[in-house]
Image (cartoon, rainbow, N blue to C red):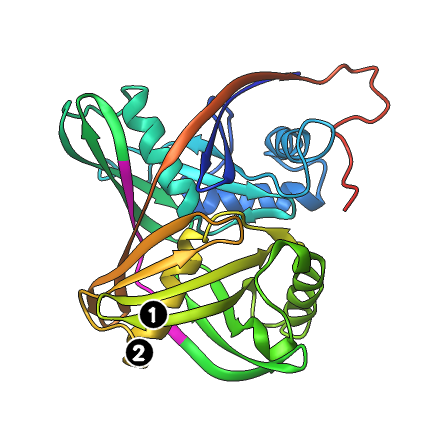
Amino acid sequence: MNVRTVDYHTAGEPFRIVTGVEIPGGSVPARRDALRLAQVDPGAPGRDAEEIRQLLCREPRGHADMYGGFIVPANDDGAHFGVLFWHNDGYSTACGHGTIALGAWAVQTGLVAAPDTGSTEVRIDVPSGRVAALVATEAGRVTAVTFRNVPSQPVELGVSAGGVLVDLAYSGALYAVLDAGALGLAVEPAQLPELIRAGRRIKADLPGRDLYGVIFYDRRATDPAGVRQRNVTIFADGQVDRSPCGSGTSAVLALLHADGSLPDGAVLRHGSIVGTEFLGRVVGGGPDGVVTEITGMAYRTGESVFALDPADPLGTGFVLR
């Protein structure tokens, strides 16, 4: 088995892009369903793609915090392409940092034509709906990408989980949001093991919610331009987002907008545990929630051809953490 990838990082978070993988299904959500079935049924259609996910996520070719996506056909002619996001625990419904990376990739490879200087909308079908990457170019170079998400909204406030109260918000996936200080923690690399344990504990306490991630924030401050906040998101099976988390930023924006902390036009400067930043804003709304845009940047980090020797006793790899 040989698998070609193009790798990017968005604000420090990896995104491994894979094309040319056949996945059964007539839509992006149906293809995700097929892959989730293939996780538990070795004989199911789509098992080859599931084994590629394992190969690229697991050690020694990946790591516990690897992230990526399979490029698939769009649901219809309204989008340029579709994507199935994957991580250490399977297949997610949403990924903002991945959408930002895909916008940069689509323009830089010429998949979507763009002017030397200007803005280009790259429309992408993801399992949670249709999203867009607004790619800014100057003199032929991509300089920024803005992720426009599906509508986001608060779901429930003050839910008890893991010994604390959390606020739940949907932004293509369901997130629990809380101040890290409620657990005596801070968003610092030295406290990451404790944050991972706390995130897993909170998720385990909400088994019927289909919770994707837990967002811990601290250092929240307001100023005339809006809100500044540092966060870390623990998602999937204890996976750590190095970026400020794109779809998670949408969830935070929905909560801040609902409680009046972030009016229309104000900016959330959302920092990550590694010091990178996204700029988020609410740009509209409707019955399904607020429309958010998150601006960041993705950079190409390399290309690879990964191989699996059929004689390798480790097969598609292992997960140590």
Residue 144: x, y in percent?
A: 27, 38
Q: Is mark 1 on a helix, strand or loop?
A: helix
Q: Do tag 1 and tag 2 residues touch (Cβ < 8 Å)? A: yes
Q: Is residue 28 above or below residue 236?
A: above
Q: Residue 258 carries which label?
A: 2
Q: What stretch is highlighted in magenta?
A: 144-154
Q: In which quarter of the image is the N terminus?
A: top right
Task: Tell me if residue 65 can be seen.
Answer: yes
Residue type at tag 1: Ala
Q: In this view, does 48 lie to the left or right of 282?
A: right
Tell me: residue 180, above or below residue 165: above
What numbered label is drawn on residue 254? 1
Q: How far apart are marks 1 and 2 (CA)?
A: 6 Å
With respect to residue 295, does 21 lie above or below? Answer: above
Corner quadrant of residue 116:
top left
- Membership of 147 in magenta stretch: yes
User: Residue at position x 48%, y 65% from top?
Assistant: 174
Badge 2 amino acid: Ala
